Amino acid sequence: MISEGLLKNLAVQGLCDDSRRVKNGDLFFSMPTADFEIFAKAALAAGAVAIVGETPAPEGMASKWIQVADVKAARLETAKIFYKDPFGKLTVHAVTGTNGKTTSAFLMNEMLTAAGHKTALLGTIKNKIGEESTPATLTTPGLLDLFAFGARALELGCTDLVMETSSHSLHQGRVAGIRFRSGLFSNLTQDHLDYHKTMDAYFEAKKLLFTRYLADDGVAVINIDDSYGEKLFDSLNGRKVAVSRLGKEKADIRPQGTVVNTEDGLKFTLPMVAVDAFETPLCGDFNVDNVLLVLGWAHSIGVPETAIRKALATVRVPGRFEKVWNKNGKHVIVDYAHTPDALERVLNTARSLCRGTLSVVFGCGGDRDRTKRPIMGDIAERMADKAWLTSDNPRTENPADIIKDVLAGMKTDKFEVEENRAIAIQRACAALKDGDWLVIAGKGHEDYQIIGKTKHHFDDREEAVKAMEKC
């Protein structure tokens, strides 16, 4: 393995495992791929001081080559040395699941902040250290980026890190080196089958948070209303908390009586946490699940009730059932819902609040799980009065082909097709009457549209407001 002395002798300024990002003075970790020599040469040309690889040195690289038995293990141990093991000092909390990760992470962060902790946040929308915030590129960054972020968080005085952990990051070992003090499981529904292939494999990837990466004395907080969540809960030993919106008897956290759900938010009683009812501007059954999950977590780690209530009252999550227009009896919601379950839940919530016609604008991402497309078409047709099919990050696929896949799940003519997302939003907004609701689903907080391999500025919220101001 690589020693601290070797790093000093090489005058290593940084660590990198992507040849496109190498800076002068970096130590480059060459993964055992078919093209490793090409990447190693590119790294040296960009200023890498040395290459760490598993093979003997390629021709001409002997003086710059460090051979190890396992490059991933060497990368982890080197990151611990170079970044002074930040995850041995930070208290790290993780949330995983198909849907609800972002809202849960935001709420967890707000509760810790209200309790007086200085926090860092990693997730789908943004990465944040105290008041220092940058847009996120991945739900969970790569291992070296994680260590750099952890070191920066410690440098700025953080004590806690809240992070969303994707199935990809767990399966690929990006979170190796972290022992989470708590892990939350929200749900598991169809998504990412282009990567995992089967739901069972997807579940096994999520399960790693609790079986491989959770600290021995860490706590697992799990939504047992979800069938995979209940299976996970039953399989675990150690500290664990079961949460149920449906009031399952074995749940440690479950609401008492009726949960009041209006467009102004939620109100419910949770006697195992506090005597008085809790209130939050978050609304919808899916947010009941998110809030209960986080309340179960907060109660298990001892967050004060005052901090819990303050966070519930003030939390705002961009692009998650975000009300971008509610004037003149017309309501427009923007939501990140891009999976079948998320779309169904968002439309179900909107339907429960809608007095008039419910419409939805949505599409499906290109170069991603194709099997969910007809399912989402069926959901939109069943749950909305009118659907507008459009583009949603088509990437390298033809938008018309993606829409054709969606239409395979639709049997009526309750839809219109408009590939141009801006025009689809304009037409859907123009059709609204008093009492009507429109859900624009799929992109949420995103402020771009990926066409081909290029990102173009596009924000559903901006487009909706512009369209509604002309109505």
Image (cartoon, rainbow, N blue to C red):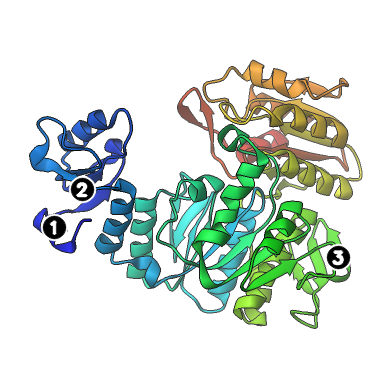
Across and down, in percent, residue 327 comes to: 78, 47
Type of residue at label 3?
Val
Mark 3 vs mark 1, CA separation in Å? 60 Å
Q: Residues within 10 Å of mark 1 (few under 14, many from 20)?
A: few
Secondary structure under tag 1 reads helix
In this rendering, does residue 139 appear at all? no
Q: Image height check: is 443 above or below 401?
A: below
Type of residue at label 2?
Leu
Residue at image position (82%, 46%) is: 350
Question: Hey, which quadrant is residue 334 in on the image?
Answer: top right
Question: Hey, which quadrant is residue 264 in on the image?
Answer: bottom right
Q: Earlier in the sequence, mark 2 or mark 3?
A: 2
Q: Quadrant of the C terminus?
A: top right
Q: Nearer the viewer, residue 88 or 355?
A: 88
Q: Which residue is mark 1?
A: 6
Circle 1/circle 2 CB separation < 8 Å: no
- Left or right of 410? Residue 393 is left
Secondary structure under tag 3 reads strand
- Tag count: 3
Q: Which residue is mark 2?
A: 27
Q: Which residue is mark 3?
A: 259
Across and down, in percent, residue 52 comes to: 22, 45
Circle 3/circle 1 CB separation < 8 Å: no
Q: Earlier in the sequence, mark 3 or mark 1?
A: 1
From the image, state whether disc 3 or disc 1 is nearer to you: 1
